[in-house]
């Protein structure tokens, strides 16, 4: 056990981070096992999502995640899984809302300064 105050704090932080990382890795493993047991577009999407989350949390390296996702895609293709269409973004709704607003009134022209004689 550490005696120094900063070392004690560091040990606590390390334990918390380890718990979070282990949870994230366990989520990946269960999602991948679910996909291997029953290959479908939903389970594939879930597994890939868990892998992406791990990269976002810096638990997995980007290249490792790409390799794992590639392997999942290869298994899906071999199993004949059809990919579900991607969800549409809501960005076009913003453009439509902006177009519906009336044009703002123009500012009046600035007055010309009057020259004194």
Image (spheres, grey):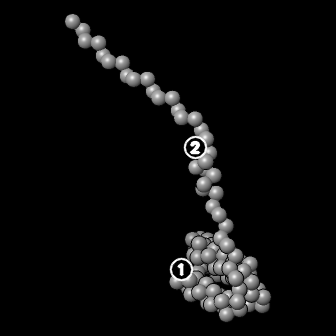
Q: CA distance from mark 1 to mark 2?
A: 40 Å
Q: Name the residue that disc number 2 marks.
A: 99
Q: Report the front residue among 114 and 76.
A: 76
| Rendered image quadrant of residue 55 | bottom right
Q: Nearer the viewer, residue 85 or 8?
A: 85
Left or right: 107, with 42 as reference point: left
Q: On residue 114, which mark appears?
A: none
- Give coordinates of residue 73: x percent, y percent: 63, 86
One can see residue 44 in this view: no
Q: Which mark is residue 62?
A: 1
- Quadrant that contains the C terminus: top left
At mark 1, the secondary structure is helix
CB under 8 Å between discs 1 and 2:
no
What residue do we see at 63% from left, 52% from top?
93
Dot 2, crowdedness within 10 Å: few (<14), some or many (≥20)? few
Vertical placement of residue 16 versus 33, above or below: above
Which x, y percent locates residue 25? 67, 82
Where, quadrant-wise, is the N terminus in this rendering? bottom right
Q: Is residue 6 above or below residue 73?
A: above
- View extreme (top): residue: 117
Q: Residue furthest bottom?
A: 78
Give whichever of 33, 75 is nearer the camera: 75
Relative image position of residue 27 (x, y in whole percent):
72, 80
Residue drawn at (51%, 29%) of the image: 105
């Amino acid at each position: 056990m550490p005696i120094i105050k900063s070392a004690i704090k560091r040990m606590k932080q390390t334990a918390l981070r380890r718990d979070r990382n282990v949870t994230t890795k366990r989520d990946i493993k269960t999602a991948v096992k679910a996909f291997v047991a029953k290959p479908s577009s939903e389970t594939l999407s879930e597994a890939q999502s868990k892998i992406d989350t791990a990269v976002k949390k810096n638990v997995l390296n980007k290249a490792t995640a790409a390799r794992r996702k590639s392997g999942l895609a290869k298994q899906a293709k071999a199993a004949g899984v059809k990919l579900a269409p991607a969800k549409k973004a809501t960005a076009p709704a913003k453009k439509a809302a902006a177009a519906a607003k009336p044009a703002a009134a123009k500012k009046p022209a600035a007055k010309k300064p009057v020259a004194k004689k």
